[in-house]
Image: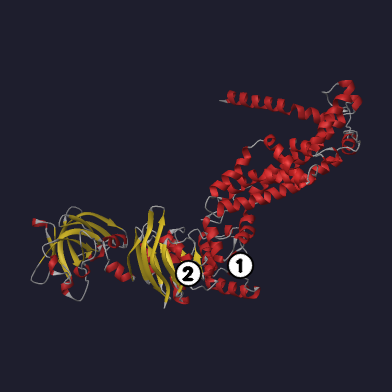
Amino acid sequence: MAALRIRDLHKRFGPVEVLKGIDLEIDSGDFTVLVGPSGCGKSTLLNIIAGLEKASSGDVEIGEAVVNDIQPKDRDIAMVFQSYALYPTMTVRQNITFGMECRRVPKARQDEAVDRVAKLLQIEPLLARKPGQLSGGQRQRVAMGRALVRDPKLFLFDEPLSNLDAKLRVEMRMEIKQLHARIGSTIVYVTHDQIEAMTMATRIAVMHQGSVQQFADPDTIYNRPANLFVARFMGAPPMNTVTARLEGGPDGPVAVVGQGADAIRLPAPAAVGPDWLRRPVILGIRPECIAEPTRYFSEDPAATMTISAPVELTEPTGAETIVVLRLGGEKVLGRVAPDVRMPTGAVGRFAVDTRKICLFDPTTERLIA
Amino acid sequence: MRSTRIAVYGLVTLLACIYLMPLLVVVLNSLRSTPDIFRNGMIGLPHGLEFSNFTEAWSGLCIAEHCTGIRGYMFNSMMMTLPATVISTFFGALLGYAISLWRFRGDMWVFGIITLGVFLPEQMKLVPWVLVLRDLGLYNTVAGLVLIHVIQGLSFTTLFCRNYYVGIPQELMKAAKIDGAGFFRIFWRIVLPLSPPILIVTVIWQFTGIWNEYLYGVTFASGDHQPVTAALIALAVTVSEAPKYGVQSAAVLIAAAPTLFVYLAGGKYFMRGLTAGAVK
């Protein structure tokens, strides 16, 4: 069953169109992350789902019912905000019960619900405090408690972790994911952080300039990005994209990067159509698909190919070493094991995982194969 | 460096002394007996403290041929200032809340027109008020003055409150709407509890402004109904005809005391940062 369906949704602010026809269908129990750079329209979309802003045209359905003209309070949703938006003069308990108070839930049931949520989020000792007396992580928990206590059809999260420091962010990320696994609710989560999207989502909608670029599970988004924007937005460091020329070969199509003696020939995905032969394409390859020569990618020996390329720079991060190398004259990044040290300026040997190569149309920027 | 600092402090102290001189003279005279003032002049230190000046000013001083002191007029002023302050502050908060946190089409125009009242001088509105009070039958009543001060005060109180409330994060409003709270519930439960700093500023402003107001008091009230500021003009007549400087000084001080008290009592509540914890 679709918990949330969005049909041909447009939003204009005067002459500026910030949402250009959004179509999404989110299943019950899904953890959907809307991710994109700032200004892509993801927060506006979330506000429209919540009913805090009105769409210019199009429909929002929650639980199979069109809610376009329904007030936020009657949409059966709960929302967690970036700033937490806790009521500063109320205690934690009052913050959590305020929604029930507005809905005239009997006092005994309110107390029961608070106890349940407080236990779930381990905020029992904080119930009598005011938001000003809480740390950032505690406020975050209370804000989630306020949403969880209502058991709504849909949870909306608007960048809930972006005000936390890096360490706490990682902890809360895991906790939210665990919480979702435990209570199985439907979540729409907005973030600009592609790592949050990858780690938490069951489905990701990548947004850019007011439209959904790709809506798929994290693996597909990462390995088969629908276009160059998705390829370059997801992943840190992002996918390498270089221009190449497609040629026919005895074992299938070959992508040639660079010219003359520097040229590197990489096996292209077999699915590429014959009409692309002898035409320029954009070749995309993830940095982790370029590794030290001893790396074992797959049982299939054909998956791995060894190349030589000049090393320009190395960046040891501790967990791995990022190598800047020249692939057929084009600058690309590789990720080698942390203890591998490649002398800068020398020619190094690299293993390339050729199964993960993507090809894009240079004019439409869409994935070809 | 050091010498300029001394010069600055010296100048400031000198100006403060000049400015405070009349207050000092009035305070000293309020504690002096009438013969003492006659013998030694208006300016001088008291020979013994004459607190009876205050009791006489309060209940025995003759103003406009009524020798009942300023007690009744103080009561009039209080009956005018307290309700006018409370009502104008309350509606200012409500208006400011509506304009700042419930954006609607033309809200800036509404705000602009309301605050235009800040710039209109009192005397300009005398004639319209005469007509309004006459038609409502509130001429020469305290209720009429309350009405005037509530309406006139709305411009200021709305301006103050609106400018304070625009600082309340929109996300709080969104959260409350999703929680199911409506216009008045958000006002009572969320906005008003955040408001003490601005309400205290507004109350001090309104209280002193209304208490000290003179033109309307003297125009729209007469005899026993006058507020103390208007009654004090009659005092000025007795000052020149039958001078009792000590009692008259005490009367002036009593009339000024409530505003002074409001400043001193409210001052420490001039605080900020109540929203700390709401965001970030």
Is residue B276 rendered to the left or right of residue A191? right
Q: Quadrant of residue B23?
A: top right
As rendered, which of A263 and A294 lies closer to the eye?
A263
Quadrant location of the N terminus of chain A?
bottom left
As rendered, which of A158 and B7 lies closer to the eye?
A158
- Say what amino acid the circle numbered 1 marks: Cys
The vertical placement of B265 against A55, above or below, is above
Q: Position of residue A211 (x, y in %)?
A: 34, 62
Q: Position of residue B265 (x, y in %)?
A: 73, 45
Q: Secondary structure at mark 2?
A: loop
Is residue A117 rendered to the left or right of residue A347? right
The vertical placement of B262 against A273, above or below, is above
As rendered, which of B254 and B145 lies closer to the eye?
B145
The vertical placement of A154 against A169, above or below, is below
Q: Which residue is mark 1?
A: A102
Q: Position of residue B226 (x, y in %)?
A: 82, 39
Q: Secondary structure at mark 1?
A: helix
* Residue extending furthest toward the bottom: A1
- Chain of the residue that carries numbered disc 2 in the rendered image: A
Marks 2/1 same chain: yes
Q: Which residue is mark 2?
A: A67
Do residues under tags 2 and 1 come within 8 Å of each other at their CB atoms? no
Q: Residues within 10 Å of mark 1 (few under 14, many from 20)?
A: some
Quadrant location of the C terminus of chain A?
bottom left
Residue A31 visible in the displayed image? yes
Is residue B267 rendered to the left or right of residue A47? right
- Say what amino acid the circle numbered 2 marks: Val
